[in-house]
Amino acid sequence: METSLFLAKFWGWYLILFFFILSFNPGRIKQIFTFLKDAKFVILVSFLAIIIGLLNILFHNIWEADWRFIITAIGWVALFEGVTLFIFPERIIKIMEYLNMKLIQVTYVLLFICGLFLLNSI
């Protein structure tokens, strides 16, 4: 349970900070997508996502119908994004750009709500 509490705090604060950073500086999103045109950056981001996803899954792979599932889902999403971005970079970047333009405000709000939920669950 200690690992679950630690990861709930970590991901909760991370998601809230990410929300505020992108809310106060939305130009960062455009900058990230500009960087995604560089193959070295894509490889680095892919490896980082794979490492974060694997570590999260190895330390916390709990499939219970409560707040701990969110932590497990974050790990699996990170792993899946890292692997797919590494294998199919052009296709995944196009999908990310399309979804980003259509769902950016929804994504911000969901990140914020998810972060608050994790912090309030502990």
Image: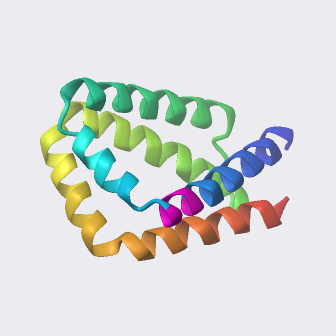
Q: Main secondary structure of the magenta part?
A: helix
Q: Nearer the viewer, residue 118 or 1?
A: 118
Q: Is residue 25 left or right of residue 13?
A: left
**Which residue is rendered at x = 74% and y = 51% of the image?**
8
Q: Position of residue 107 (x, y in %)?
A: 44, 69
Whether the magenta-drawn stretch holds residue 21 is answered as yes
Position in image of residue 75 (x %, y %): 54, 43
Q: Is residue 65 visible?
A: no
Colour style of the rendered protein structure: rainbow
Name the spot of residue 111 as percent of width and height, x first. 55, 65
What is the quadrant of the N terminus in the image? top right
Of residue 44 and residue 86, the one placed in the foreground of this image is 44
Going 66% across and 62% down the picture, which residue do you hit?
115
- Residue 79 image point, x, y percent: 43, 38
Q: Looking at the image, which is closer to me, 33 or 54?
A: 33
Side (left or right) of 114 relative to 44: right
Q: Residue at x 43, y 76 (%)?
A: 106
Which range of residues does the magenta coloring cover? 19-24
For the image, the number of numbered tags is 0
Is the C terminus in the top left, top right, bottom left or bottom right quadrant?
bottom right
Q: Is residue 2 above or below residue 11?
A: above
Examine the structure image and report whether residue 12 is included in the region drawn in magenta: no
Q: Toward the viewer: 13 or 34? A: 34
Q: Is residue 12 left or right of residue 120?
A: left
Can residue 85 be seen here? The reply is yes
Which residue is painted at 41% across and 62% down in the image? 26
Q: Where is 117 relative to 42, above or below?
A: below
